[in-house]
Amino acid sequence: MATSEFPAQKDGSKAVLQETTVVVFVLGGPGSGKGTQCPKIVEHFGFRHLCAGDLLQAEIESESENGTMIQNFKKEGKIVPSEITVKLLQQAMEQSDNKRFIVDGFPRNEENRAAFENIVRIKPEFVLFFDCPEEELTKRILNRNQGRVDDNIETIGKRLKVYFESTLPVINYYNSKRKVQKIDAQRSIDEVFEDVKSVFAKLRPVARVGSTK
């Protein structure tokens, strides 16, 4: 992508996306196991895994004008505008042959949620919520030893504060719409995935294709 403009939608593309697309938001606090469970969902159910953070980073690495703008927001400690993130998600969805998506760690706040519904005009099939208490989240992040610069006590506290103040209201919103499938994420990886499988098994059978592009 060489310019700052997102590709124009083809006539009717939005309608096609609406009719054929299944979107599942995957939410939970840092350390709740989203990153472990998403690849399992891809493998077992044929979904395409989209992560807003990965898409933003890929855009930065592309050295496009958009990427430079995103990088500047991050350098200044500012949140990337929801419209930019949502349009990257929309673009990835439109370019994918697979029209079943798990969107990992998004929406992070009410602004994200509203922007996605206003721009993409798709409501999630459901929200997969990995529920885990704050004490367990903190312990897991400290123990996972991934070498992340944001895995110290002070920054963990800040990340959890953002989650509880900004993301939990999004989960509560969808819960009021009866869209939340809550998973007890305190258990082992295999036990958690058994519950995940039972949730996804209720969806229409997916036509398996050669890739999850």
Image (cartoon, helix red, strand yellow):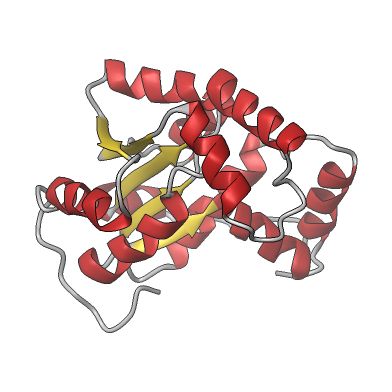
Give the vertical position of 121 relative to 168 (above or below). Answer: below
Judged left or right of residue 91, residue 155 is: right
Question: Where's the N terminus, which quadrant?
Answer: bottom right
The residue located at (15%, 64%) in the rendering is: 206
The front one of 8 and 21 is 21
Is residue 9 visible from the viewing direction of this image?
Answer: no
Residue shown at 34% from the left, 41% from the top: 185
> Would you say residue 17 is visible in this rendering?
yes
Asked whether, in this view, residue 198 is left or right of residue 95, the answer is left
In the rendered image, the vertical position of residue 20 relative to residue 135, given as above or below: below
Give x and y (percent) for residue 210: 27, 84
- Is 2 displayed left or right of 30 in the figure? right
Quadrant location, the C terminus: bottom left
In front of the other: 22 or 75? 75
Counting the numbered discs, the total is: 0
**Residue in front for this viewpoint, 4 or 115:** 115
Position of 164 relative to 115 (above/below): above
| Residue 193 image offset from top left, x and y in percent | 24, 54
Residue in the image at 83% along x and 50% along y = 69
**x then y, percent, for residue 58:** 67, 65
Identity of the residue furthest to the bottom in this view: 210
Residue extending furthest top?
A: 176
- The structure residue drawn at horizontal position 32% and vertical position 55%, both measured from the top left corner, is 189
Pinpoint residue 37: horizontal percent, then vertical percent: 36, 56
Please state if 12 lies on the left or on the right of 63 as rendered: left
